[in-house]
Image (tube, helix red, strand yellow):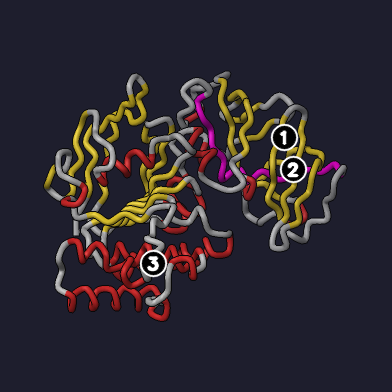
Amino acid sequence: MASVTYDNVVKNFGDVSVIKNLNFSVEDKEFLVLVGPSGCGKTTALRMLAGLEEISSGGIKIGDRTVNDVAPKDRDIAMVFQSYALYPHMSVYDNMAFGLKLRKTPKDEIKKRVNEAAEILDITHLLDRKPRQLSGGQRQRVAVGRAIVREPKVFLFDEPLSNLDAKLRVQMRAEISKLHQRLQTTFIYVTHDQTEAMTMATRIAVMNKGILQQLDTPQVLYDRPANLFVAGFIGSPSMNFFPGKLSVSGGKVSVDMDTFKVQVPDALAAPYKNMDGKRVTFGIRPENIHDPDFAPVNIHGEKVSAKVDVTELMGNETFLYLVNGKNTFIARVDPRSQKRVGNEMQVIFDMDKFHIFDLETEEAIR
């Protein structure tokens, strides 16, 4: 098993800088997810680790060995692609065994490894079939099985679930998580889907425009995003943002959004007491905005007037799309809420769970 280290890694394509001074470490046996929007550089970072892209400057280590100039086949990694990349003319068994045959692994050892991997992935009954006879989920399992038989130090996954339907993605997420627990190997997983990242990762690295924005556990990213980008990217629906101004009066701190004003609880007000008049971005997640008929008890609630513009009844919850002056925002409320389109209402902001960001730097102010 092995750790992975990116040390001031830069990747340029001509004059275009795709990765800018990437620095982070992946611990041995960790499940790290690289997440971000399309074009943020996450797949390029993975491909440099795999040896499929050259590094412009900096270094990448697997364990204690710098692998910048090591051939991909000698890096002791295995990669699972979005496209499965199975040989159509070969059986499932031969697809899984192919890499081992190239390495001249003894036949008995090949058979042992393939059968063990097939059992782990529940595809033993598929070993004689061709890829065209398999469903998308089964093909993905074969691609994962081909990686498992290599017994690598590091597994790399490049958006492996994006070709699957929604139900199958949920199932495969759970299977890959169980696989990590069973194999106890380092996993590095690239996705643009923050739900995949939140549900699978030990830690998440959030990237944007080739720059690492924040690296931490899923819960810390959710509760304490470092900046406006991370706050908006992590969470579904996204965090609501309002342009506002801090106001300090009589020792009390509030945030004035012109059309409404909310007070910061005294216990959380200390970082803002010397910032009277400072322009900020106020953030609050949809799940922390409540229908007053079903608001939790013992929260520091602030009432905000709004008009219901759209409702989405999801069964286990209801999304209310709300309007207050020029501000539009989403509340994720109890499914028993009776509020409908056109209703005027007062929602409750849970001020124990707000976020404030510097308007210019977009960094969180805590």
290 or 12: nearer the viewer: 12
Magenta stretch prevailing secondary structure: strand
Q: Amino acid at mark 3?
A: Val
The stretch of residues the image draws in magenta is 343-358
Residue 298 pos. (x, y %):
62, 54
Q: Earlier in the sequence, mark 1 or mark 3?
A: 3
303 or 86: nearer the viewer: 86
Left or right of 155? Residue 82 is right
Left or right of 364? Residue 120 is left
Please identify the residue farthest to the right as the structure is shown: 342
Residue pointed to by mark 3: 142
302 or 354: nearer the viewer: 354
The mark closer to the camera, 3 or 2, is 3
- Label 2 close to label 1 by CB (< 8 Å): yes
Q: Earlier in the sequence, mark 3 or mark 2?
A: 3
Residue at 38% across / 79% down in the picture?
124
Please identify the residue farthest to the left as the structure is shown: 64
Q: Residue 321's mark? A: 2
The mark closer to the camera, 1 or 3, is 3
Q: Earlier in the sequence, mark 2 or mark 1?
A: 2
Residue pointed to by mark 1: 328
Residue 253 pos. (x, y %):
58, 30
Residue at 29% across / 57% down in the picture?
155
Query: Crowding at label 1, few (<14), some or many (≥20) Cα neighbours within 10 Å?
Result: some
Q: Is residue 334 visible?
A: no
Left or right of 135? Residue 41 is left
Location of residue 16 by image quarter: top left
- Label 1 close to label 3 by CB (< 8 Å): no
Magenta segment includes 357: yes
Q: CA–CA distance between discs 3 and 2?
A: 43 Å
